[in-house]
Amino acid sequence: MSLEGQLIDQKSLRAVTGKTADWNEIAKDCIAFAKATGGRLLLGSEGVQDAPSAGQQFRADLPDTVRGKLVARTINRAVLPDVATAANGGQYIELRIPRAMAMASTTDGRYFLRVADQSKPVTGDDERGQKLNKLVWDDHRQSPTELIEPHRLAALVLEHLQRYPESAISCIHGRVGGEIHPKQVKRALEDLIGRWAVRCEGDYRWRRYWAVS
């Protein structure tokens, strides 16, 4: 694991479990990373050490819970949570946040940028905020299919299949971003198959996809 900075942050498991969970804070960091160059949130350390507690474990469904909570609190943002194990046997969640493919914000209309090791709010009172507000207005005037560049979506889909082979399209859609229209994911898969980057087997709901190594 790595120290906090422009591309990485660390949070305790308390931030995403039980009564101490602070989903709005996690959503803020996701938006900040997405609006910068992307980044990673390592959920399972206190932010002052390089590894989780030895032998640390958590429920197997926690990554899906994290993704669902963040989908409900953010707009035009994709997160990819994976379980990782440190050398001391402690588990942590590596939450990868790609650079935003469209204007990303929290569902209550707030915007953040990652600056060094902090997630800074952006308001309409400064030059960045004025430019951001114009981009948000332009994005809202576009249709959903115009908000995502096909090559970026294809890259996300391929990355998912490299980590999770034999995935159904519903699983792929859920992990790359529930806010993305399913037809866009289907087109991305068809493009990848046409480029021999992905193969599939089965029909209809039983169809499964693999990345071609």
Image (spheres, rainbow, N blue to C red):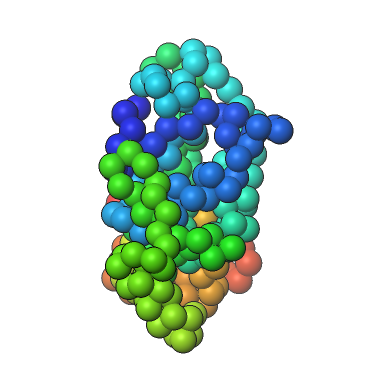
Rendering coords of residue 52 (x, y %):
46, 20
Q: Which residue is drawn at 58% across and 70% down?
A: 203
Query: Residue 206 occupies which quadrant of the picture?
Result: bottom right
Where is residue 199, by image quadrant? bottom left
Q: In which quarter of the image is the N terminus?
A: top left
Q: Is residue 193 in sight in this rendering?
A: no
Q: Residue furthest front?
A: 125
Q: Is residue 152 above or below residue 90?
A: below
20 and 179: which is toward the camera: 20
Q: Is 91 on the left or on the right of 9, as rendered?
A: right
> Hey, which quadrant is residue 190 in on the image?
bottom left
Judge by depth and name the residue closer to the eye, 152 or 28: 28
* Residue at 63 percent of width and 67 percent of height: 205
Q: Which residue is drawn at 60% across and 40% down?
A: 22
Image point (58%, 22%), residue name = 57
Q: Which of 192 and 99 is in front in this view?
A: 99
